[in-house]
Image (cartoon, helix red, strand yellow):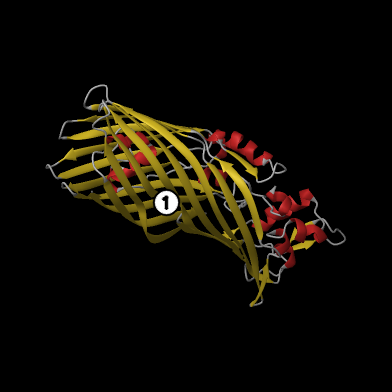
Amino acid sequence: MIQKLGISLLFLAVSQLSFGQNESDALRFSRNDIHGTARYNALGGAFNALGGDAAGSLKNPAGLGVYRDNEFSLSATYTEHFAEVVYYGNKTQTGQSKFNIGSFSITGVQNLNQAGKWRTTAISFGINRVYDFHDEYYAEAKNVNTSILDDYTQEINNIGVDWQDLESNYPFDLYLLWNNLLLENVPGQTNQYYNASGTLPIDQAYELETDGAKRETYFNFGSNYNDKLYLGVGAILSNTRFDRTTTYSEKNDPGDTTTFIDEFSQTYYEEINGRGYSINIGAIYRPIDPLRIGLSFKSPELQNLTYELESDNITIEEGEAFDVISPVVLEYRYRVSSPFQSSLGIAYTFKKLGLISIEADYIDMRMMSMRGRSTSDPFTNENKAIDNLLQPVLNVRSGLEYRVTPNISARAGYAHFGNPYKDKVGSDASFQIYSVGAGYRLDQYFFDLSYQYRSNSDQFSLYDPNLVEAVSVESIDHRITLTFGLKL
């Protein structure tokens, strides 16, 4: 496993400085957000029972049976991301903006005039961004009484690693700290260490920047039986890119005479790329004309991922910088199997006045699994962490649409994605999305516009929570999506 390749996972499950493949990364690549067409976004993603939308048919391919015309659509999204971080009472704020093409789709419809009660069949091809990994924030505090080196020292002394084995066993962290004289050997003991960076309170800073996205390319088929039953099946190919840079730094008190080190920083550069595949099936049933009930299932997604890591340590000593780079660049291949998903939705249309829709997903996050590309890498500890730290979630989405005029519609939606972590973990990965939007439709084309407000909050410890206060993060996204559609 990756620990055998030399990565120190001293802070697993409690620190943002932990790296490598663990249950957090498996979770990251197994979750969805609400990204798609502007109409889909404005209605909170509640399209399981509605159909007739490109992003909605990715969720439930039976929605293709609702189409009556060939259609092309293209969506662009502008996002403003803000983060507020509090650490030891010190507040910092960051912000960034992004623009991307969120979705693209082509749908073809075939009328079955000679097939009895089978009205239409439809096929669609599209690409949809399902999760955005863009994030950036900064935490800092002054006069902290402990150092991350205290945690490192405690852990490495418990392990008892000889200094000559640091390069081969811990080339990305402990070796760099030792090589840059931040960790020193206790005189006469080659496997015991002490913190050589000083004894007085220090200033700390932590910076995180992530980039990338997960996109799904889909091929769907749907049909319409007697305008009562709609059936669909689809194949999904995913593409994931995730980049993360984390920097932890400490600055010593100038009056600390127990050390010659002024400050240091440790930076990790991580990159994960992968592809996956899954299938989904679904049905929509209309027991009475205005009422629709949708049910869909998505198989576990099998993802093949490649992880790369390198790091460096910079120490400032009497104004002079000393930079030590990890002696190797790690590349490791592994697999993640995401959990099975089931979704149930109900929608009611008020003739030409509008509609209301609500749906829920049930996903048991404990059904995720990880393994290496060979049978010798079973990821036993990671899979135990998935079972012990994660739990089932219920994601709820709802939407409301009102037709202001025959051509103009107003929309609103709300979605809540549950926390996949158990209470004992102390981490909250739930989030909420509020949305509004409008649409303008004519016979041959349409424009839709949506605004989403996404918020979530969490806290974590930079190292041993018994030694340091938690960092609190409040994140907010403002998203504006514009969709252009053309009926062919």
Question: Could you say which is closer to the camera, residue 134 or residue 207?
Answer: 134
The x, y position of residue 252, in whole percent, is 63, 67
**361 shown above or below 210:** above
> Dot 1: what SS?
strand
Residue hosting label 1: 475
Q: Residue at x 66, y 70 (%)?
A: 315
* The quarter of the displayed image where residue 115 is located: top left
**412 shown above or below 4:** above
Q: Residue at x 66, y 77 (%)?
A: 318
Q: Is residue 342 visible?
A: yes
Question: Could you say which is closer to the camera, residue 299 or residue 417?
Answer: 299
The x, y position of residue 410, in whole percent, is 19, 43
Q: Horizontally, is 478 left or right of 369 in the view?
A: left
Question: Could you say which is closer to the camera, residue 365 or residue 341?
Answer: 341
The x, y position of residue 234, in whole percent, is 42, 38
Q: Amino acid at mark 1?
A: Ser
Question: Could you say which is closer to the camera, residue 223 or residue 334?
Answer: 223
Q: Horizontally, is 178 left or right of 114 in the view?
A: right
**Residue furthest top in the image:** 287
